[in-house]
Structure formats: structure tokens, C-alpha cells
Image (tube, helix red, strand yellow):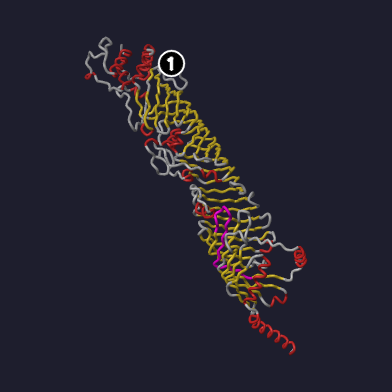
Amino acid sequence: MKLILKIIGGFVALIIIAAIAIPMFISADFIKGQLQAQVKKATGRELEIKGKASISVLPNIAINVEDVTLGNPAGFASPYLVHMAKLETGAALMPLLSKELRITGVTLHGAKLHLEETKTGAKNWEFAMAKPAAEAKSAKATQTKSPLNALAIGRVTIKDTALYYSKAGAKPLAVEALNVSLDGADGRSPLSLNGSANYQGQPVQVKLGVEQSKALLAGKASPLLASFNVPSGVVNFDGTAQLGDAPKADGKFAFTSDNLGALMGWATGKKPAGNLPKKVSVKTQLGFAGMQAITLKDLNFAVDTLSGNGALVLNLAGAVPAVNGELTLGEINLDTLTGNAAGGGGSGGAGGKAADSSGGGWSTTPLDLSGLRAVNANLKLATPKLTTGKVQLSNIAASVVMNGGKMNLGIGNVSLYGGAAKGMVTLDGSGAVAGVGSNISLSAIDIEALMNAISGASKIKGIANVTLNVNGRGTNQRALVGALNGVGTLRVNNGAIKGINIASFLRDAKKGFVFGDGSTEATDFTELTASFKIANGVVSNSDLAMKSPVLRLGGSGTINLPARTINYRAVPTLVGTLKGQGGDDAQGGLDVPLNITGPWSKISVTPDLEGIVTNALKNPEALKNNLKGIKDTIGDLNSPKDIGAALLGIKKKTPADVPKDATIDATKPAPSTKEQLIQQGIGNLLGN
């Protein structure tokens, strides 16, 4: 026992003496020389150590070097690949006796790493060393068996380090203030990484946990937990991952950003598109099997005011991302999503910018549909409500196809103001000028509610069926409306023209044609049909046909959409019987032409006096017979003069106001004014 104790004691004493003696007999220059020689042999580069170099062996081996530079070969802009202010490392002493290398840790202080790639493709981080054939064969033979039984690495710490990357023709990148702590780098225990840095001048934080890092590095799957805090965004993943030639991942993924434009600008170093959404959040079960097959199951997301859920398949391998799938969306406001917050519907324009006088109330704020170029898509969508301007649609089932900046929105039987709509709407953001088109049909629509939503006013009400095929291009709302072209049809049943009641005017000769603002009068009809064309924003019609019990109405004219004005001539025909919609349109009657003119906000309806006389003189006998029928039917037409007064809007005079011998005599000299001419013509026609 005493012998054993003496041997152990002597061994310990030997170690202590060696620990004291080695630093005395091994100089710093020797250490530097050995390091430089080994680096030169391994990399072909020059290692320069300007600072201190030291080694100690108790309680463990410790090596410290300062002011270390690894040079670059010729042809690179930077003179060195890496410069380290200080490098500290070491190994446990006792395990070396069992051929186990256990590195106690590696600490790197104040390093600067310059990565470069030249025009020829040469990279300064590649160390291509040509070995003689004999040496290569010998090295291969010696690699058959490792001199170590085990390798373990303790904590790796990187402090205040910077990494720079430059490539010919590309913008340089810089990662500065890099601080990292890494445990489990040898794969013997779970890997844990915590790091922070400044990238593009903004702070970044990273956390990574790998349960089976050795398996992960060997191309096998391992549970993985990752978190990235980047400017204006947070990314989290909790699942499994697999590296190798075909990396895979499957797990819970979450992403949030309070400013997507700022995040994209930071990540790419480029100014982002101005119409990107601001706030974005995504939660999903992520499946990753390469950039061409990314699946998002149980997806829940929010983009500014838009939210939804569903499932998607993404392909990010192309120049433009592609997405396919099905989504159920919340309520959508297109004006909010596109930045046109004020919308249309007679609100004075979008974006809060007043239009000029020639704009007629349409916005001159530039239209920007360039965001449509950011993605290609083939989607099925559903939403309970969609709003644009003051127009609202509900119970929508739609399809969206996007390609090259063009979007086709196919809609099914969408609920719209008591009726339904279906067809196709197109948006074109592929060029500098925005394009819009539609080919839709509306059935059983409340036309008054729809027109109020579109233009802010409506002079017609009833249940309508409409077809519309229209398209246009423009840099702003006003220009777009002024470039609209297309065709359409209109049929309205059981409706009314608001603001005028022709039959009422003729029932009360004392009233005449009086048109004022806020009139509650209306001309009821059983059926109204028309077709129209649109050319450069001007709607023209020539076949208006309306039927009511005592009226037939034809008309033609234009509606100027850019100026928001109307110039229309309607010709009501008074019929002699109270037949309804099935009445004979060909029967004779009294034509009462009306001029409908003015801005949409204040439409004026006035009688065309010359037209009345002209139409009446075409067939005097038919007119007199018809008037007799009208008198018997409607009543309150006391004399032909009363009818003339009604047509002219002249207040009926009382007997005290009119001399007994006051008559219209065709033998008297011709009157001098237009009104007198018209009065005489009507008087001669109806009275004499």
C-alpha cells in the first residue's frame, strides 16, 4: 500500500513539476511557430500572431493567443480572411490519458470575418490544397483509424464579432455586434444556441434548441425548437426537422409582423412596394419538403383588417411565389386593403383628396395594382361580406386566379341588394397603367339601393335584371372611369322614376309641370327595358321602353360618367285607356317630351315645349280623339285650354282673371314670342 501511495504521489508531483516547468521551457515564440506551421500546412494561408501567446496545463490545458490574423490569397479586396483580438481554448487534462479530447471551451473575442466572392467565382473561405500523390495516399491510410476514442466540445462563446460578405456586383452585407453562446456542439448532448447581432443596422435575436443534434447533422430527423426576433417581426417553430440533401420540417409555425414593409426592406436591402400590408400574423401546421412543396394546414391568418382560415400549398422556388388552396375569409373591405379608404359611391373621391372640377367627383389619387405582381395564385375563396366604396356583397363564393400581375375573380351567385350577381371581375396590375374589367349579370336586384351605393343618388327604383360587360384602364379613378368601354342591358319591373309624376301633372291643370328639389313625386311603371353602350366613359342609349297604365315612355340620350352628368330626352306618350303592361304601344296618344339634364346630384326634368307642339301637329285628329279619351279616363280636364295650360306649366286662371271674350283667334296677327306661338298652336289645335 505504501508503495502504491508513493507511486501515485510521485505521479502527481511529476504533473505539478511539468505544469510549472513546461511554460518555462516552451516559449511563446515556439507556440506561435507551431501554430503558424500547422495552419500553413492545413490552409496554405499565413497566420500572423502579433500579440501574446501562452499555454498552461493545470488544472487543464489552456491556450491563449491575441491579435491573430489569417491572411487572404492574392486577388481579394480584403488583406485577411479573419482577424481575432483574442482566442481562448483548452482541453481537460486527465481524459487525454484515455485518448479522449474534451475541449473545455472556445471563446472568440472581437473577431472580424471578411467573406468575399470574386467575379471569377473564387471564394476566400475555400482552402484548396494540392497534396502530392504519395502524401495523399499516406493520409488516406492513416485515416482508417482515429487516434482519439472520443471528442467532446464544451461551450463555444463568440463575443463582439463582425461578419462581412461581399460578392462582385452585389450589395455588401454586414452582421455586426455578434454575440453567441453554444452548448452541445459535439452532438453528445442537446444543442442550445442563444445569439444576438445587428444586421442591416437592426438588432436580431436567435434561439435554437435541437434535442438530437448528432442525428440532425447525420441527415436524420430530430425535435427542434427555434425562435427568431427580427425587426418588425417574430418567427417561431416547434416540431421536427431533418437536414441533408433533402431537408424537411414538420411542426407548428407562427409569424407576426407589425410592419411588413419595414421587415421586407430590412431582409432584402431594397425599398419594398408601397402597397404592402402593414400588420400580418400567421399560425399554421407547417410542412416543408423543399421550396417547391410547402404546406400550410390548419391555417389561421390576419393581414391588416383581413382575416381568414383554410389550407394552402406554396411553391417558392420560382421567380414569383405561387400559392394554391382554399380560404374562408372574414369581412373584406377592398378600399382599405388597396389604400382607397374613401372609396367611391359619390363620396368625392378616394384617399381624402378632392377631385378637380373636371373630375366630377372622381379621385385623382394614383391607382397602384403593382402588388398583384408579387404572387401567382389559384384559390377558392368564401367570405360573408365584401365592401368596395358603398357597394356591399354578401355570401360570396369565388375563385381567384393570379398570374403575372393579372387577377381574374370569378363570382358565383353572390347576394346583392335583395338579388344575386355572378360573373367575372378582372384587375390588371401588370403594367404602369391599372386595368379593370367585368362581365357580370345581376338578377332581381333592388336597383335603387344599388345606384345609391354606386353613385350616391338614384332616380329609379324597382326590381332589376342587368348585364354588364365593361373594361377600362387608367392611372387614377377619374382616368379609369373616363376610359370605360362596353355594353349592357337593363330590365326593371314594378318600379318608378323618382321626382316626376306625369299623370298627376295632367290630372291637375292648375298645377302644371313643376319640378323642384326634394320632390316626392314618381312615375310608376310596370316594365322598363333598355340596352346601352359605353364609350370612353359615356353611356349612350336609344331604345328605352317603359310601360305603365296611362303612359308609354321612350327615350334616348347619354350619361357622362367622368363628369357625372346626364343629357337625356324622354318621350312619354299619354294613352287613352287604362291598359297596363300588355297595352297596345302603337295606339295614338299625346307625346310629352321631357329633357332630363344636369349633374347627378341635382337632375333637372323640364318639358320640351317645342317638342310637344311638333308632335301634336303631326296628327291633330288622333290627338283630339285621344284627348277626349284621356278626359273621360282621367277627369279634371275642363277645357282644351286647361290641357294647354297643364302642358305649359301655366297656372289655371279663374273666371274673374279672364275676360269673357278672351279667346285664341287664329285670324289675329301672329304672336311675337315663342311662348305665344306655342300657346296659339295648342289653342288652335285643341280649341278650334
Q: Is residue 42 visible?
A: yes
Residue 686 placement: quadrant: top left
Residue 539 falls left or right of residue 314: left
How many tags in the picture? 1
Q: Classify 471 as above or below 55.
A: above
Mark 1 surroundings: few (<14), some (14-19) or many (≥20) residues within 10 A: few
Task: Tell me the residue that label 1 is attached to.
Answer: 587
Q: Pick the quarter of the image with the N terminus.
A: bottom right
Residue 30 screen position, x and y as percent? 65, 76
Residue 413 screen position, x and y as percent? 54, 36
Residue 157 magenta: yes
Q: Is residue 395 visible?
A: no
Q: Classify 31 as above or below 468.
A: below
Q: Describe the element under mark 1 as helix, strand or loop.
A: loop
Residue 363 placement: quadrant: top left
Residue 38 falls left or right of residue 356: right
Residue 428 magenta: no
Frontmost residue, 688 versus 87? 87
Residue at the spot 43% in from the left edge and 16% down from the top edge: 587
Residue 265 falls left or right of residue 682: right
| Magenta range | 154-173
Frontmost residue, 223 versus 525? 223
